[in-house]
Amino acid sequence: MKFGTSFAALAALALAVPSLATAQGGGKPTVAVLYFNNGAIGKANEELAPLSKGIADMLIGELAMNPGIRVVERDQIQKVLEEQKLSTDGKVDGQTAVKVGKLIGAHHMVTGGFITDRSGKMRFTARVFNVETGLIEFPTAGGSTGVVEGKIDNFMELVNQLAVKINTGAKLPDIPARVGEARKEAAKKVPYEAIALYSKGLAAKDAGNKAEAVTLFNKSIDKFPNFEKAKDELKKLQ
């Protein structure tokens, strides 16, 4: 297992996290995404561990395409987790989600998990907590609306689908139709191998292994030359 003209412009934009969408102000609802719990079994658990951060980061990028919300950047969340000595290994519970949400001023906290099987399929689950009340906003109790599944090779498409479900389930402002379509198309172009390497790069970066992170981000770009998120991470490290 391994890890018309204006429309084209929108599709390219969907591969990056726009700074405007993450800017402060405007009274927009603020959304933050915590690392996903790794439910893979056996050897796959260790192999796929970096995806805990990778899934969250890619989901942040997808949600940030909604101009009606503000999305907290991953680096800011990582800093809070480290300062508060909270879990950074992908084992996040509701209490931690709400605590972090209050510290970073978020209104909605997204948590989730992932599992895989030997056939190469992956399943994502997600929940959204209301930071003010501490209650789960999405999915509804006993429901499966916060679940997406498919082939691991279609990893980014699954992330895109999950972002749409979260946006709808948490009753966030609607995503403009053209932006939504552009995101959907852009997601089809990102190979899983690039995301797997990128995820490992994030883990190395957070562990303070700068040289290893740079190598992994460069390898990710080799797999997908238009991978703007990997390029952005390289800029931060350089």
Image (spheres, rainbow, N blue to C red):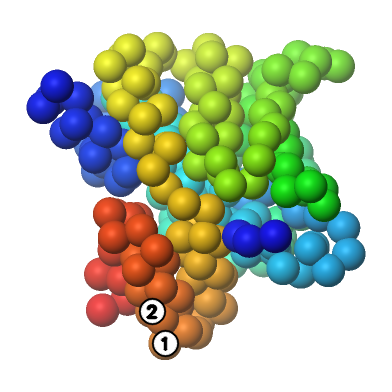
| Residue 169: mark | none
Most extreme residue toward the left is 5
Q: Which residue lies under the disc numbered 2?
A: 214
Mark 1 is on which residue type?
A: Ala
Q: Which residue occupies 83% across, 68% down? A: 43
Please tell me whether residue 42 is drawn above or below residue 39 in the rendered image: below
Q: Nearer the viewer, residue 96 or 57?
A: 57
Give the crowd class for mark 1: few <14, some 14-19, many >=20 residues within 10 Å: few
For the point 29% across and 60% down, the residue is 225
Residue pictured at 42% horizontal, 87% vertical: 211
Q: Position of residue 32 (x, y in %)?
A: 51, 39
Q: Are marks 1 and 2 in contact (CB under 8 Å)?
A: yes
Q: Quadrant of the N terminus?
A: bottom right
- Mark 1 vs mark 2, CA separation in Å: 5 Å
For label 2, the SS is: helix
Instruction: Name the kind of residue labelled 2 in the image.
Output: Val
* Residue 181 at x, y percent in the picture: 35, 20
In this picture, residue 173 sits left or right of residue 115: left
* Pointer 1 residue: 211
- Which residue is pictured at 34% across the width and 65% down the height? 221
Looking at the figure, which quarter contains the C terminus?
bottom left
Residue 37 in the image: state x and y as whole percent: 74, 50
Q: Quadrant of residue 90?
A: bottom right
Disc 1 on helix, strand or loop? helix
Q: Is residue 235 above or below residue 128?
A: below
